[in-house]
Each structure stands twice: as C-alpha cells, then as structure tokens.
C-alpha cells in the first residue's frame, strides 16, 4: 500500500498584506500531481487546511477543490487542526464522503476508520484531530473511563485516548495513526501558534504502539521524524509560512509504502511551487548591491541606518517584493543616563528621544510638530 502524507496547508494565510492565493493553488495542484505520479492508494491530510477558523469563501473554494481533486485519485482521510473549525468541517463531511473524502472532525469511541483500497488492501486508521485543553476531557470521557480516572494533565489524557483508539488495530491490515498534535522534542518550522505548541500540549512519541505501521502528524511546520516505537513523522507545511522559517529545510510531501507484514519505508517528494521567504539585513549601500539578485522572493528587509523620513520607501523602491521593512539603527557607544523630563515640553521630549537614538532629521521633527498641533 502506498500512502501520501500531507498537511498544514494554511490556505488563506497571506504575509505582510500580500495574498498567497496563487501559491496555495499551485502547491495543492503539485501535491495532487505527486499523488498521481506516485500511484498512491491512500491520502492522509493531517490538519490545518485553513489558516483561520473563519475562512473566506475563496479559501474554502481552494481547499474543497483540492480535496475533490485528491479524492478522484485515492481515498482521502482528513482531521482538522487547531487553525480549523471542526464544526464547519463536520457540516460538510457527508458531502465529501460521497467523493471519497472522509473528514473525521471529532474524537469518538468507535473502532479505527477502515479503508479498503482499489487493490483490495485494508488500512485501519486511528484519527486524532486537534484537542484543546477544554475539549480533552470530553474526548477522554468518550473512551469509556470511570469518573475517578478523569484526572491528570493534558498529556496523560491524550495518552489514554491514543491507547484506546489504537486498541482496534488489526494485524491483517496496515495500521495508521493520523493526528494533529505536538511531540515532545519536536522542532518548530516557523509560523506555529506558540501558545498551542508548548509543554501543556505535548505527548511523547512513545505513546504510539509498535504495531502502528506509520504515524502521520500535522501541527509543526518542519518535516521531521520523531524517535518512537514505530515510524512517526511530521510532513511539514508545503509553503514557507513565516520569516522565522529560514528556508533551510526543503518543502515536501511524504510517500509511505507498507504492507501488513512489512515495515514502512518513507520517501520524500519535494515541492517547489512556493515562493521563498528571505531576510536581508545590512546598510542601504550593501542592500543596493543585492537589488537584482532576489528574483521573485518575498523579503523582510532590516536596514542598519539612522532613522529618517522616507527610508522605508527607499528600501521598497529597491525591492518591490519587500513585505516587511524594519529599521535597526546601529547604536554607538554606551547608553547615556536618561535626563529628567518631567518639566519638558512635548517637542523637547521628542527631540531628546531622537538624540538618544542618534537621529538627526529635521523633517521628522517638523512632522511631529504638525501632528502635535492637529491633536492639541
């Protein structure tokens, strides 16, 4: 059985006010092409299809079109991530099921989802969507535990849920886990919500049983294998989503080959549709030397110059694809003691502020005066 693992699409996410709709459409088409060329039997989508729980109609169109395209190639199984609205996905689940796309929006106490491929192979899939702190108790209770067993931290509860869902694995099938969660020790890839990836939301990779052929994870945007009793992988995001992603790791989908009697092998299939996010940092003179060497990359430019009116506009004239321009003046010498300011007029305070930062720009002082007069 050949399985394609993808996730963390984050459709609808722009950067610096720039839409990335074309990139998302292109990379999702590239994923569908990879699924067809690799002749996969099953496709797993590990959450965060959207970037927000209230996606735009355009974002919904792109995601739903992509799911239908994938469903024509092989059965598709989807779990929502922390950016998705599980109720919205659950509402459209019956429609997608008729197209070969099974959306498992909630944890339930049923046996793992069973899929029979066109070649007659069987897969049993334990599905674990994103579980927030407030939802973990309900999910835990669905596992049939006694009231006295409902105590414990998030990790303990999630461990019990994994144990209950994987108890239905069958040695005559390919056993899979599809989940959106954080593994202890995993590396971030850039753009994750920090509040939902810290230790309060983690589980050990050892929670997954050794009779699982493969664990397909979403949530962290860096593709990586986690040490465990079975193969545990994050597929990573198909696009760079934030400038904290330095682009050192290639974007990809994973193709897994396994049978009920053989261990899984994992192949990385590279993706190339997304634009590169780059950070340039230096003086204006040095930046000018790079003006013809950035292609179509989206840029964050950090300028090491004294602050002056119009500096950011000069940078944008050099780099039309600059989506963020930051000015970081080089501080000279030791920071002087702050003068007493309690009796100073506003324009004097502003002058002191500029002087402390080694800014000497009369136009900036004039603009401050005009704004102050309008507000006074």
Image: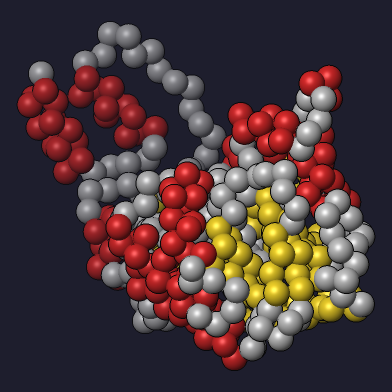
- Residue drawn 78% across the image and 34% down it: 144
From the viewer's side, name the closer residue of 93 and 156: 93
Q: Quadrant of the C terminus?
A: top left
Residue 188, given in percent of the width and then of the height, sits at 66, 54
* Residue at x-position 71% and y-position 86%: 119
Tell which of 359 and 112 is nearer to you: 112
- 150 in relation to 95, above or below: above
Residue 38 appears in the rendering: yes
- Is residue 71 toward the left or the right of residue 301 in the image? right
Outermost residue, left direction? Answer: 374
Q: At 79% from the left edge and 21% from the top edge, which residue is drawn?
A: 147
Relative placement, left or right, of 223 versus 206 is left
Residue 257: quarter of image: bottom right
Q: Position of residue 245 (x, y in %)?
A: 57, 61
Q: Residue at x 62, y 33 (%)?
A: 135
Task: Pick the residue in front: 252 or 328.
Answer: 252
Where residue 101 sits: x, y (%)?
54, 67
Image spot of residue 14 (x, y percent): 37, 58
């Amino acid at each position: 059985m050949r399985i394609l693992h993808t996730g963390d699409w984050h459709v609808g996410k722009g950067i610096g006010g720039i839409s990335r709709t074309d990139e998302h459409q292109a990379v999702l088409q590239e994923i569908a092409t990879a699924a067809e060329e690799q002749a996969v039997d099953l496709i797993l989508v590990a959450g965060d299809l959207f970037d927000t729980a209230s996606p735009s109609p355009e974002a919904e169109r792109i995601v739903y079109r992509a799911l239908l395209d994938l469903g024509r190639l092989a059965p598709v199984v989807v779990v929502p991530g922390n950016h998705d609205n599980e109720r919205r996905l659950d509402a459209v689940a019956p429609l997608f099921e008729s197209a070969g796309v099974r959306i498992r929006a909630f944890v339930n106490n049923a046996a793992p989802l069973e899929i029979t491929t066109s070649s007659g192979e069987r897969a049993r899939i334990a599905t674990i969507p994103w579980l927030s702190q407030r939802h973990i108790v309900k999910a835990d209770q669905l596992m049939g535990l006694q009231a006295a067993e409902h105590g414990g931290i998030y990790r303990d509860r999630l461990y019990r849920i994994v144990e209950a869902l994987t108890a239905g694995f069958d040695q005559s099938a390919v056993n899979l886990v599809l989940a959106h969660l954080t593994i202890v020790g995993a590396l971030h890839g850039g753009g994750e919500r920090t509040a939902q990836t810290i230790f309060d939301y983690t589980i050990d990779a050892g929670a997954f049983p050794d009779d699982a052929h493969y664990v397909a994870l979403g949530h962290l945007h860096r593709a990586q294998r986690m040490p465990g009793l079975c193969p545990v992988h994050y597929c990573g995001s198909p696009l760079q989503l934030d400038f904290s992603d330095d682009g050192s790791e290639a974007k990809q989908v994973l193709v897994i080959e396994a049978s009920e009697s053989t261990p899984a092998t994992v192949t990385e299939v590279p993706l190339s549709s997304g634009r590169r996010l780059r950070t340039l940092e230096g003086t204006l003179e040095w930046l000018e030397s790079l003006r013809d060497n950035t292609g179509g990359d989206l840029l964050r430019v950090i300028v090491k110059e004294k602050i002056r009116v119009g500096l950011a506009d000069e940078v944008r004239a050099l780099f039309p694809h600059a989506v963020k321009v930051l000015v970081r003046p080089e501080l000279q010498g030791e920071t002087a003691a702050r003068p007493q300011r309690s009796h100073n007029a506003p324009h004097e305070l502003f002058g002191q502020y500029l002087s402390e930062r080694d800014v000497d720009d009369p136009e900036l002082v004039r603009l401050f005066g005009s704004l102050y007069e309008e507000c006074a």
